[in-house]
Image (spheres, helix red, strand yellow):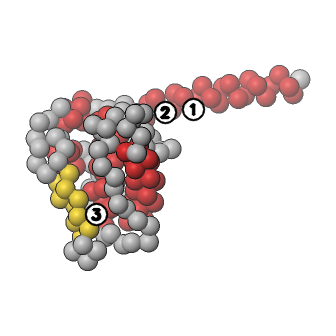
Amino acid sequence: MKKSILPFIIIVLSVFACGTQKEALEISSEEKAVFKSEDEEPVEIKDEVSEYEIIIIEPGFNAWLLSIARPEGYYSQQFMENRNMLYVMEWNRRVLQPNRYSPFLYEMQINYEPGIDYGYEVNYKLYNYFIYFQRKYNQRLGPYIPRI
């Protein structure tokens, strides 16, 4: 009797888990409109103390950051540092495999080193770019669902 119940429980749990993921990946019509935006206002990411700077020229990212993304202060710097480290490692791995991953999506490596305090603003904008990128281009850079 126990042998027949266990597979049933696993099947029910896996069906439930699939339904949950599908729901979390939905993108609102407002967000889709921002993705289609041709606005190419560059977003500067820099920290004077660490002298770290990135300039993102991605159509729609600035509008998405201002209208869709969670506001500054929503996430802790530690949370974003942990996620950014995972996303950067996967991003850089994909840059090095242009035959497997589109070189138009993954053009350049990102130099983001553990142990360096890049500051809140750098981590905030970099984290949100990764979320924007994953949602817009339907990519997964890590084990987490790219949510807002």
For label 3, the SS is helix
From the image, state whether disc 3 or disc 1 is nearer to you: 3
Residue type indicated by callout 3: Val
**Neighbour tally class for label 1: few under 14, some 14-19, many 20 plus, Cα within 10 Å:** few
Relative image position of residue 60 (x, y in whole percent) = 17, 41
| The C terminus, quarter of image | top left
Task: Answer yes or no: is residue 131 visible.
Answer: no
Q: Is residue 133 above or below residue 48?
A: above
The answer for how far apart the CA atoms under marks 3 and 1 are is 34 Å
Residue at 27% x, 37% y is 104
**Neighbour tally class for label 3: few under 14, some 14-19, many 20 plus, Cα within 10 Å:** many
Residue at 18% x, 32% y is 36
Residue placed farthest to the right in the image?
A: 1
Do residues under tags 1 and 2 come within 8 Å of each other at their CB atoms? yes
State the residue position of label 3: 122
The dot on residue 17 is 1
Name the foreground residue: 95 vs 115: 95
Relative image position of residue 147 (x, y in whole percent) = 38, 43
Nearest to N terminus: mark 2 or mark 3: 2
**Neighbour tally class for label 2: few under 14, some 14-19, many 20 plus, Cα within 10 Å:** few
The dot on residue 137 is none
Residue 63: quadrant of the picture? top left
For label 2, the SS is helix
The answer for how far apart the CA atoms under marks 2 and 3 are is 29 Å
Residue type indicated by callout 2: Gln
In screen coordinates, is 47 left or right of 89? left
Task: Answer yes or no: is residue 108 visible.
Answer: yes
Residue at 30% x, 55% y is 126
State the residue position of label 2: 21
Relative image position of residue 144 (x, y in whole percent) = 47, 44
From the image, state whether disc 2 or disc 3 is nearer to you: 3
Name the foreground residue: 51 vs 11: 51
